[in-house]
Amino acid sequence: MSELVAQPVVREIPPKDADLSAWYTAVCLKAELVSYSPVRGCVVLRPYGYGLWENLQKHLDLAFKETGHENAYFPLLIPESLLLKEADHVEGFAPEVAWVTHGGNEKLTERLAIRPTSEVIIGVMYAQWIESYRDLPILINQWANVLRWEKATRPFLRTMEFLWQEGHTAHATAQEAREETLRMLDVYKDFAENVAAVPVYAGVKSANERFPGAVETFSIEALMPDGKALQSATSHDLGQNFAKAYDITFVDADQAIKHAYTTSWGMSWRMLGAMIMVHGDDRGLRVPPKMAPIEAVFTPIVKAGDDRAVAVAHDTAKALRKAGFRVKVDDRDQQPGWKYAEWDLRGVPVRVEIGPRDVEAGSVVLVRRDRKKGDPDHKTSVPLAGLERHLRDLLESIQVSLFEQARAFLESHTFVVTERAEFYEKCKSRAGMIDIAWGGRAECEAHVKAETGATTRNTRPLDGTQTCVACGEPATVRAYFAQSY
Amino acid sequence: MSELVAQPVVREIPPKDADLSAWYTAVCLKAELVSYSPVRGCVVLRPYGYGLWENLQKHLDLAFKETGHENAYFPLLIPESLLLKEADHVEGFAPEVAWVTHGGNEKLTERLAIRPTSEVIIGVMYAQWIESYRDLPILINQWANVLRWEKATRPFLRTMEFLWQEGHTAHATAQEAREETLRMLDVYKDFAENVAAVPVYAGVKSANERFPGAVETFSIEALMPDGKALQSATSHDLGQNFAKAYDITFVDADQAIKHAYTTSWGMSWRMLGAMIMVHGDDRGLRVPPKMAPIEAVFTPIVKAGDDRAVAVAHDTAKALRKAGFRVKVDDRDQQPGWKYAEWDLRGVPVRVEIGPRDVEAGSVVLVRRDRKKGDPDHKTSVPLAGLERHLRDLLESIQVSLFEQARAFLESHTFVVTERAEFYEKCKSRAGMIDIAWGGRAECEAHVKAETGATTRNTRPLDGTQTCVACGEPATVRAYFAQSY
């Protein structure tokens, strides 16, 4: 027993290339992002994982507010009769709904669904709130937990309960609703690329992949190291479908009573899963600085009883915190090598080494997590006096570098294909994002899926007249195909 | 129909003194803090109400982090078998639990409770995470929705689903756990008084009012204008009760395996209900500046086509926002009087009037929401040049003034009583906080409740030897009695 207490937990993880799935699960658990829970399909988001979520929230919430949105909170439970009003929607979600049938010791007269998403309850409220065109647009976002019945459990990627945000807006015209849908798609793309450092393709989902009840669904799609795509956020133009089902009407300036046009858009903690898979390496996480709960960790070294480095580390960390940095001092009584491995595993962007000799020289050594031992810029000694500026520059450089690495991967794994055989082969071999001229036919899409496992990720306008690479009919769009999470 | 569109909604509310309950409901609805929803017992927290919640979150979250806590997120659903392990706890909560019995089309083999609170699921996880004394303390907070089956609905005060935070900590010793319990009680008292401007009495709950499963429960209690107390937050020392039920053990430095000591503490959106009732007046809300979604609203006046005031208002608001103020410009095409009533109803602390004459004079008029027409300091003209400093001072002054008014009310409605008859009479007549030497006997407490409707709010140590004012047995504590929400 005594050895168990004295020894830090072993945190080794399998190599990323050999088995991405095993690597991913090990990293999520051993970096203490999540724990499995005794509730099937549900994970616990531990403090370090929640720190990632808080940074996602901070950035997205600011972007939502800058685009005129306010937050609100709607009930968790939705009466069954309300859920049934939008036919496509209920068909899409009914198999995934958890039902409350008893309150205390009493059986309910009507079942209540735990929200799988909130279009229904929010639509009902909008119908009450909106009277005239002066009440439009309504621009609301909700940060919430939602629940979709699931048997599989993969941290962030597939869980029964998950955290997300869902925006819900109502507009007077179809054009305004479409503009809003695209504006929020842009907000997501900007967040993914400039905060999470995950490059994405933005575009339109095929009819088959559309949100139940939407007129048009847009998505951003990232590419994982195993060649599979991961849908990272969606933005839906709901047209008047929900307005008609839930009676969201307004008196327009011309005195006519009209149905509003609504949108909804969401990003969940799935985005964290994409970020983890895209950037991680064999040593663990590599967290982009803007998302990092800890931007820099001090690992002071005590030698022969000389603990001056610990004091300097604490003083310096305090000053950096005052300047707005998120920093931590690891002064635990453990071997330096073990500490380095621990912070590498957790993906802290910069490690600050300081020992007695550094104290005397008035300097520290900055170690970049995004580089490897032997890389020329892996470690830099910088004077304590200029640390703040150096650290700021270094964090910026790491942020950019992680994005550039990911972009290079996405680009080198995106294949513009013009031959049918090559297209099927690349889809089957999970080569990456396969970019073709496509006819948009559901039968064609189904055939590709049956033969290769790949689906359309999203589409964009086509230049000129071409034929569909997958089936030879006239092409209508350009589409990315890929296998996907 | 055309008149309906042109006219703003009537927002009149009944006088506060005549019927506090009617006033309260009207304010919550007409100031657009909440809407009733089609889900029994559940309300929607609308953007302006959510703005209050965001400010509560911002202040409390910072205080939690400054005291070493981190956020995490635990599952919404709790398997019934786990809930049953702590006998007192399950007895206390079982009648209030909503049960999930079906997932999709499948009947579950075990019912899942929607969390009424999270001691159980968090206890189970702590048992997994904690191995040695080195893992302690664990200091975690969760921001979450919880659900307790309720038939009545009163916005913020009594709803089936509500938003709250729940802290859950584990410690190596009883003393540390008790210190934590008291530390968080202090955090709550500080928040209530210095942010929400609601004075409170902090103390120990009687055994009868204790949290199910706790060794000791502490609370802060506020006094409402109708003489009823409102419990605004609780902090529980759970001793080893949950550790024993859920097997939270650790290997101590002496190699012995011991049960941990745990605490939990929570504040919900109920605190907003207290704040609304304590400060509001016949014109509507009066929001303390630190809690205000909008600290100051500009109501520029256009006269005879001269709209320079609108431009100046926007420019000035922009500069104030840059300086960190939360301000808004109301440039809607409505009568000034209607706008004033609207912002009074919403309780914005400062209204900034600006018309053509003010533009020429280079000044604005600041109007305090906490004062009435005719009060000497109701309105002040200040030069635009010094607006930032004036506004900052004014907001601080309003914050203090609201607290002082509420404190004067609490003090004038707290009665130190030494005679039995007077005690019973004051309890019955809902005089306020009735402060007596009390024997702490459950029979005595039950008798007071049966006769008067009043209960112990909380207790504190007694000086010297006295007899219980309520029953004549030896007194053990001083206690506040009151009727309560």
Image: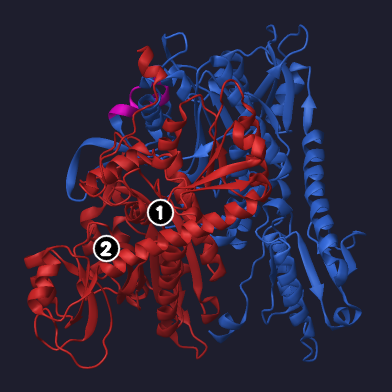
Chain colours: A red, B blue
Instruction: Check the residue under mark 1 and report the chain it is in.
Output: B
Tell me if residue B421 is in the magenta stretch.
no
Give residue B131's mark.
none
In which quadrant is the C terminus of chain B drawn?
top right
Task: Give the amino acid at mark 2.
Answer: Leu
Compared to residue B66, the image places residue A65 above or below, namely: below
Vertical placement of A5 versus A136: above or below? above
Q: Name the residue under label 1.
A: B39
**Looking at numbered disc 1 in the image, what kind of residue is underneath it?**
Val
At mark 2, the secondary structure is: loop
> In this orientation, which residue lies closer to the viewer: B45 or B195?
B195
How far across and how far down the image is residue B259, in percent? 43, 15
**Quick one: B5 or B376, which is closer to the camera?**
B376
Decide if residue A301 is on the left or right side of residue B194: left
Residue A167 can be seen, yes or no: no
Report in which chain the residue with disc 2 lies: A
Numbered range of the magenta stretch: B81-91
> Mark 2: few, some, or many residues within 10 Å (few <14, many ≥20)?
some
Q: Give SS at disc 1.
A: loop
Q: Position of residue A339 (x, y in %)?
A: 45, 33
Magenta stretch contains residue B83: yes
* Residue B178, percent from left and from top: 58, 20
Instruction: Say if labels 2 and 1 share a chain.
Output: no
From this viewpoint, is residue B2 visible?
A: yes
Residue at 33 percent across and 69 percent down: it is A219
| Residue annotated with mark 2 | A84
- The image shows residue A181 at horizontal and vertical percentages of 40, 75
On the image, which quarter does residue A402 sit in? bottom left
- Out of A478 and B205, give the one closest to the viewer: A478
Mark 1 Cα within 10 Å, few/some/many (few <14, many 20+)?
Answer: some
Do residues under tags 2 and 1 come within 8 Å of each other at their CB atoms?
no
